[in-house]
Image (tube, rainbow, N blue to C red):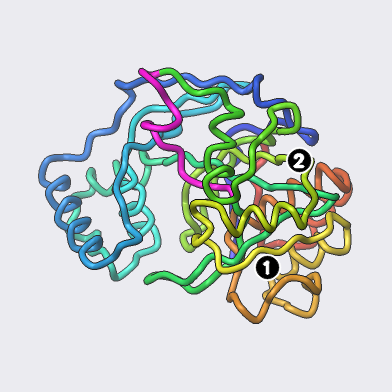
Amino acid sequence: MSFSFHRWGDFGVAGVPPDTVEWSFDPDATYSIPDGDAAVVEEAWASLVHGDDNLHDGPSLNLRGVDDTRIHVGPTRFRDHYLRRLTVAESPRFDADQLTDDGRRQLTESVHLLSSFVAVVADGQVLLGVKPPQADRGPFLSFPGSGYLDRNHDFRDGDAEPTRAIVGRELQEELGVMADGNRVRCLGVFEDTSPESHLNPALFSVVYVDESASSVLRTARRAPDADEFTEFVFVPLTEAALDGLVELAVDGTATAAPERVPTERFDGMSHKSLLMVLLLGRREVGEEWFDRTLSEYSEIVLEPA
């Protein structure tokens, strides 16, 4: 399996405080799907959501570019992102051959739904969670507190909420944890581009909390959206543990995984999770470890800045 990533904006090894990350929303920065293709998209989406309670359309944010630490966005919908994923992956769940060449190009090249991807660190350990299986995939390992950005929650009258609040919204919903802006570092905006990945960019951030790991676990189990994960586990931020997570993601070698990781209860790691492990290692262990790891795994391709 290949793991490829596009680097929209890299905020450096240490990252930057959230109050230095600015937003520019242009409501007119839209893409246009031809009328005939739009009808195909509507019909396909209606068929997909029928009987699937996990699929919900919503007003989302489309990444347009990153200048230094300013993120440029426009409007999009989750529906378009999801059908883009099926199109790029050539999934039998959506017959993309019904689209015209222009419609297919608009869907695959213009839609970059933005999300927030967060690592929570307590007591020198990072929190991981197992996502439950869904119709198109089995259970997999990911980072709790992450999610798609939402125009209704993260923007008000075209203006962004503070980046700390944007990073912290899913954190509060999934884990019941508050994000102190002084202890958040935004690492950059990256997109997973392998066809079998989630195929959307994310603002990657690390959140350091004062609570103990055991306290975070207790709070997470009572959080409003706790059912989005079947279990949680903390893993030490050591070179050996990070090496094991990378090997687990790339090779599926469970024997190398940290002993706390429940490898028998999931069958993979999300592509963004692998990149987050690499970015955490760059920050916590050092650039030498990061560069060496990338050179050891030809399966991982991170485009240069």
Q: Which residues are magenta?
A: 145-158
Residue 100 is left or right of residue 297, and the answer is: left
Contact between marks 1 and 2 (CB within 8 A): the answer is: no
**Residue 179 in sight:** yes
Q: Position of residue 89 (x, y in %)?
A: 40, 62
Does 157 sit above or below residue 55?
Answer: above
Q: Residue at x 36, y 48 (%)?
A: 81
Residue 174 magenta-drawn? Answer: no
Q: Position of residue 294 (x, y in %)?
A: 76, 55
Report which residue position mark 2 lands on: 208
**SS at circle 1:** helix
Q: Quadrant of the C terminus?
A: top right
Residue 18: quarter of image? top right
The amino acid on which the numbered mark 1 sits, given as a three-letter code, is: Val
**SS at circle 2:** strand
Q: Residue at x 18, y 57 (%)?
A: 46
> Marks 1 and 2, how far apart in space?
27 Å
Residue 150 is left or right of residue 226, and the answer is: left
Q: Nearer the viewer, mark 1 or mark 2?
A: 2
What is the count of numbered marks?
2
The image's mark for residue 250 is 1
